[in-house]
Amino acid sequence: MTNRYGEKNEPIEKLTNEATFVVDECLYLLGKDEGKLGNFVEELKSIKKRIEDEVPKPPSRKKEIQNVVEDIYAVEKPKKPVVNNPSKGKTKGWSKEARRKSGREMALEERSKPKRKCGYCGEKTNKHTKTTCPLNPKYIEKLAKFDAAKQATNAS
């Protein structure tokens, strides 16, 4: 059993909890006085510096983790990651170019659609609507304008 500070040791664990409690309590008491809190932090830094000078430097935690991986799996950890990002996935459903429909199939689909009644001439068809009815004078006028513009661009 290990904890954050090394091997599990009940007296050390109690002292660690007590130190954490004392620091938390001091932070709570000094929370409203910035000057005193600054002094407290400086004192903590000086205590930490003295401890670092007295105690030998422990091995880094990255090395410990790498050693644990090597011990458990009996394989050396690779220097460079082997796994790359996955390629972009395809979208759902069929693509538009998956299959071309024959003329017969398209005609059958057209026939199966319900026919709508033209609002101008009253004919039941899927070929035109009120705005595109060949009997509608506004539509005939519009087509004439398009033809005139087309002839003008072809003449120039």
Image (tube, rainbow, N blue to C red):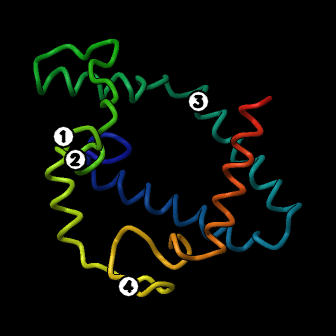
Q: What amino acid is at disc 2?
A: Trp
Q: Which residue is mark 2?
A: 94
Q: Are marks 1 and 2 in contact (CB under 8 Å)?
A: yes
Q: Which residue is mark 1?
A: 99
Q: Is residue 105 above or below residue 28?
A: above
Q: Kindly identify the amino acid type of the residue bearing the numbered disc 3.
A: Glu
SS for dot 1: loop
Q: With 133 as the anchor, is 47 left or right in this view?
A: right
Whichever of labels 2 and 3 marks the residue nearer the N terminus, that label is 3
Name the residue type under label 4. Answer: Lys
Separation of disc 3 and disc 1 at Cα? 73 Å
First in sequence: mark 4 vs mark 1: 1
Tags 2 and 3 touching, CB below 8 Å: no
Q: Which circle, 1 or 2, is nearer the viewer?
A: 1
Check disc 3 and report the residue beneath it: 52
- Residue that carries the numbered disc 4 in the rendered image: 117
Image quadrant occupied by the C terminus: top right
Mark 3 Cα-neighbour bin, 10 Å: few <14, some 14–19, many ≥20: few
**Residue 155 quadrant:** top right
Residue 91, how many percent across, how many down?
A: 30, 46
The image shows residue 73 at horizontal and vertical percentages of 11, 24
